[in-house]
Amino acid sequence: MADLVITAANVVAGASAQTKTGTAGAAIAAGDIVYLDSATTGKWQLADSDAAAAEARGQTSNIGIALNSAALNQPVIVQTSGPVTLGAVLTAGTSYFLSDTPGKLCPVADITGGDYFTLMGLAASTTVLNVDVQYSGVASA
């Protein structure tokens, strides 16, 4: 398998979604996985499972899915938990993880050597992901 192909125009938060707002530190598309870079910029950046910084790999409570597209220094809304329609084809009951492609989601089979396991959520259906981020602190062998 490969990273999920997300249609940005179809990303919609569910009724019980928890969100945070801030400023984009890079070009972000709706559906991208982002984290708040509290150490340097104070802006939302693309998360990456094999990044050097643990915060960028998901070791933070400030990680989630961008609900809107934003250019550098523009406002962004980030969903940190709850159901989200991703505009992608999911497999119900499957867990999805932060990819080593910045900002992307993938199934566990795509986690390769040196990537950290950061669970982003479980698919509740073929369209909805229940966001529940869990950082393992463990890299794949």
Image (tube, rainbow, N blue to C red):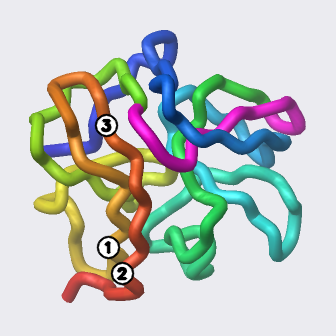
Residue type at mark 2? Ser
Which residue corresponds to mark 1?
117
Q: In screen coordinates, is 48 left or right of 42?
A: left
For disc 2, the neighbor class at 10 Å (few under 14, some 14 to 19, many from 20) is few
Q: Quadrant of the C terminus?
A: bottom left
Identified by mark 1, the residue type is Phe
Q: CA distance from mark 2 to mark 3?
A: 19 Å
Extent of the magenta region: 72-83
Q: Is residue 35 magenta?
A: no
43 left or right, relative to 79: right
Residue nearest the viewer, comparing 59 with 32: 59
Q: Position of residue 95 (x, y in %)?
A: 20, 53
Residue 30 coordinates in the image, percent (x, y): 56, 27
Nearer to me, 61 or 30: 61
Residue at 86% across, 71% down: 40
Can you identify the residue that label 3 sits on? Answer: 129
Q: Which label belongs to residue 136?
A: 2
Q: Residues within 10 Å of mark 3 (few under 14, many from 20)?
A: many
Identify the residue at image location x=37%, y=23%: 85
Question: Of callouts 2 and 3, which one flags the residue occurring earlier in the amino acid sequence?
Answer: 3
Main secondary structure along the magenta-highlighted residues: strand
Which mark is in front, 1 or 3?
3
Residue farthest to the top? Answer: 9
Q: Name the residue type under label 3.
A: Leu
Q: In which quarter of the view is residue 112 placed?
A: bottom left
Q: Nearer the viewer, mark 2 or mark 1?
A: 2
Indicate whether residue 78 is drawn in magenta. yes
> Circle 3 sits in a helix, a strand or a loop, which is it?
strand
Badge 1 or badge 3: first in the primary sequence: 1
In space, the residues marked 1 and 3 are separated at their CA atoms by 17 Å
